[in-house]
Amino acid sequence: MKNSRYLKWCFFLLVVFILLLGAVVLSLSVGDMKISFSDIIRLLKTKEGIEYAVLVNLRLPRTILAFAVGGALSLSGTLLQGVYRNPLVEPYTMGISGGAAFGVAICIVTGLYLKAGAIALPVVGFAGALLTVFFVYFLSIKRQGGLSIHRMLLTGVMISFIASSAMMFLMSITSAEDVHGIIFWIMGSLSEPNAGLIKIAVVVAFAGLISSYFFVIQLNALRLGETKAQHLGINTSVTIRVIFVIASLITGISVSVAGVIGFVGLVVPHLIRYIVGSDFRISLIGSFLVGSIFLIFCDVLARTLIAPNELPIGVITGIAGGVMFIIALSSNFSNAKSLR
Amino acid sequence: MKDYLKVNNACYGYRGAFHLSDVSFGISCGIFCGIVGPNGSGKTTLLKGLTGELEIGKSQVFLNEVDLSLVSSKERAKTIAIVTQFMEPIEVTVEEYVIMGRIPYRQRFQFFETDYDFRLAEKYMKMTGVYDLRHKMLSNLSGGEQQLVNIAKALVQEPTLLLLDEPTSHLDISHQVQILNLIHNLTNELGITVLMIIHDLNLASEYCDYLVLMKNGKVFHKGTPEEVLNYENIEKVYDTVVITRENPLSKRPVVFLVSNKVLTNASKNLN
């Protein structure tokens, strides 16, 4: 029994790795300039020509960013759905995207980004995300110490609303040009010119994955509910805090580098539970990798559907994710019930 | 004989709200002890102190002569296990659920269960009679089966003290008897000490070796079922008219309720 379960996990990971490799190759070869798989290998050896420049300077960074952001967002969704034991939670439920978008809106409206340069938007976005996270966290501390999970969820949703209303307000009193800039940022894009930011996103995503594995047993116990996890000797309040911080950080970085890319953090965790079950030992790495694959594919679609123009990646993830989700639900409703 | 579990003037409770007052009793190893009393009398509060959900003061509870307030939550989970009334039916198989009882024994970076863990899970699933259900999803089981799985998970923790909070309250009589027989066997064969909250006084009388009757956060009376379950005690604690008789086979007391209708008729006949 136990061996068959571990074998199933290995098989799942193998399939996922193959798919990931396929997605990366597809993402590198598709575009205005078609580069076949054998060309990619040849180019990486010779390191010459305009094709090599396109590959290394445009497509590779973009693919790497899609990998990191997709992985980070769906890992964050898995962690938060696990802690809150609520299948409708996603990274943005915590008010993180609202805070980040509000920060960016202020930055654009006040013209700060013109003075500080392109790096200003991600920095301000991250600051906005962190600020909301602190709000949500401190408003949810119970008088007896410890965090109230319910209050955290509601505070997050409320702060989301407040931030988006405040942003609407800013947009309604500002020029059309600035409004366009804000909307463009909110819709999300993976074409990030700054190599340093991409590196940060990758490092943070991996750090989030590794550090969440330190709490994998606690997360598994939390599936039983907070009290029953305590009965098994788990310090639930520390676990919830740490997981919340990890999820917030990786979401905050993703939002500030790539904008608001919805639905990845909601759909992928469901998909993973549907395929391999709720055991976090496999679902953490599983959701990370499947999230990466999903976002790389979505990015390929975003680049090619109306080429030479580009669709906002958020449009693709929303439609593709939603349709996938509905198909999964209607094909086997009882198994997709997720955590509860 | 030394008391295995010794509750010594326990006064813990909820911050700024309900508190136990001077609860004291002791039970020796392998005893099946029932806690009875009306709603709000402090039964669950008592258990919550033992599981660590409520903070207990120094020298209020001793387990095997060790002050429980000094024991870490992880060590506690290796000696005390609790079975609650309901379980949330999460989407895992019975075997996965039962083996979660081994979590207190995990080393820091141990991601996988050991063979010993699997052998224990198998042993206790067989003992509780859920081994054939081990590949089924928990949410597809009946209430009685879920409760048996719950007990199996608690046993996998290898506790020496097993706490049960109304384990039979929503079950039919066949499952009630099955579960209480099982618990009785645990005390007899494995030497586990059991502390069980139970509302049904007749089941308490039939199965428990020792009873603690509580009222308003205090111990009203404690002793064998014969000593505790007489009509005077019950009427004082529950404000309800009852009659007690002896079970012809087990010689344990049986409690009969008396309805208002019968009570007025009886008093008319007396006049």
Image (spheres, helix red, strand yellow):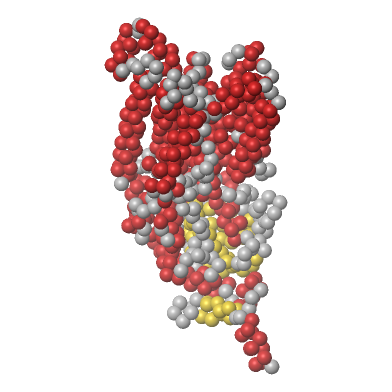
Residue B132, quarter of the rendered image: bottom left
- In the picture, measured across the screen, residue A278 lies left or right of residue B244, that is left
Describe residue A196's horizontal placement relative to residue B21 as left or right.
Answer: left
Q: Is residue B111 visible?
A: no
- Res A154 quadrant in image: top right
The relative height of residue A216 versus residue B224 in the rendered view (above or below) is above
Residue B240 or A300: which is nearer the viewer?
A300
Q: In the rendered view, would you say A142 is above or below B122?
A: above
B79 is higher (above) or lower (below) than B191: above
Q: Residue furthest top?
A: A48
The residue sitting at 43% across, 29% down in the picture is A298
Instruction: Say whether residue B250 is visible.
Output: yes
Q: Position of residue B19 (x, y in %)?
A: 67, 56
Q: Is B112 or A337 nearer to us in this picture?
A: A337
Label count reads 0
Whole-percent x, y for residue A44 in the image:
33, 12
Q: Measuring from the top left, give residue B269's x and y in whole percent.
A: 65, 92
Instruction: Locate residue A118, reporting x and y percent.
Output: 58, 15
Residue at the image position 50 percent from the left and 68 percent from the top: B208
